[in-house]
Image (spheres, rainbow, N blue to C red):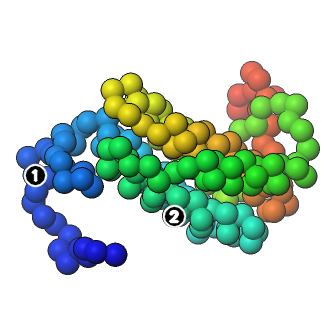
């Protein structure tokens, strides 16, 4: 690695702009910075999930995903750069197929909850969907890799499946949605 941060604050963003990886400066509220922030938040929620008790294969998968997300942030921070490719998307699809294979088919909607790890996986899923929407919004005005968008789409699906698996790992089932149910109406 080339440059290391020796000082955390730089004061260069005090006027409402921030630097991209190519050295250009953009407003902090730009679509590119919004997408970067959402990807960063997504990576943080993956870190939260990894703080939970998870089976080894799930832990291994999400530790790799954290590195992919950092690469994705690098891709978004340098316009025109590509870091996420077909191999990354395929890896998520293979993980999805493998993890989903032993789960019973869904016949009802499930709620995001159950065990703490399942709730964290659903948080990953929802933040991932926001990051995906941010990339789609950025792609309206600037080139964005199709693979990057596909990656986030598959990752949100994977997080959903992991939520189901986390509940099973904790000895719980899916939390099923019960239409019209409110507290005290039973």
Rendering quarter of residue 23: bottom left
The residue under label 2 is 67
Identify the mark at residue 46; answer none if there is no mark. none
Q: Residue at x 74, y 72 (%)?
A: 56
Mark positioned earlier in the residue sequence (1 or 2): 1
Rendering quarter of residue 27: top left
In the picture, the quarter occupied by the N terminus is: bottom left
Please, what secondary structure does the residue beneath circle 2 have? helix
Please, what secondary structure does the residue beneath circle 1 have? loop
Q: Position of residue 169 (x, y in %)?
A: 81, 62
Along the viewing direction, whichever of 62 and 120 lies nearer the viewer = 62
Report the side of 86 relative to 68 (left or right). Answer: right
Q: Position of residue 62 (x, y in %)?
A: 62, 62
Q: Residues within 10 Å of mark 1 (few under 14, many from 20)?
A: few
Q: Residue at x 61, y 53 (%)?
A: 88
Is the residue 79 above or below the residue 45 in the image? above
Q: Check if mark 1's residue and mark 2's residue have beta carbons within 8 Å.
A: no
Is the residue 21 above or below the residue 186 in the image? below
Front: mark 1 or 2: 2
Report the side of 150 relative to 41 (left or right). Answer: right
Rendering quarter of residue 16: top left
The residue under label 1 is 14
Q: Is residue 33 visible?
A: yes
Q: Residue furthest top?
A: 180
Q: Residue at x 66, y 58 (%)?
A: 116
Q: Position of residue 14 (x, y in %)?
A: 10, 52
Along the viewing direction, whichever of 168 and 31 lies nearer the viewer = 31
Q: Residues within 10 Å of mark 2 (few under 14, many from 20)?
A: few
3D distance between C-alphas at marks 1 and 2: 29 Å
Q: Position of residue 121 (x, y in %)?
A: 64, 52
Q: Residue at x 8, y 46 (%)?
A: 15
């Amino acid at each position: 690695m080339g440059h290391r941060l020796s000082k955390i604050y730089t004061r260069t963003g005090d006027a409402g702009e921030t630097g991209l990886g190519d050295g250009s400066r953009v407003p902090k509220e730009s679509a590119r910075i919004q997408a970067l922030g959402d990807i960063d938040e997504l990576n943080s929620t993956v870190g939260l999930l990894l703080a939970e008790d998870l089976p080894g294969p799930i832990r291994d998968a999400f530790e790799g995903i954290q590195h992919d997300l950092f690469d994705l942030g690098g891709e978004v921070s340098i316009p025109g750069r590509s870091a996420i490719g077909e191999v990354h998307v395929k890896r998520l699809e293979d993980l999805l197929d493998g993890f989903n294979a032993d789960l019973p088919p869904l016949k009802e909607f499930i709620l995001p909850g159950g065990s703490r790890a399942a709730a964290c996986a659903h948080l990953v899923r929802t933040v991932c969907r926001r990051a995906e929407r941010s990339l789609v919004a950025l792609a309206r005005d600037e080139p964005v890799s199709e693979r990057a968008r596909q990656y986030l789409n598959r990752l949100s699906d994977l997080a959903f499946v992991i939520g189901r698996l986390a509940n099973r790992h904790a000895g719980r089932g899916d939390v099923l949605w019960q239409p019209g149910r409110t507290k005290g109406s039973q």
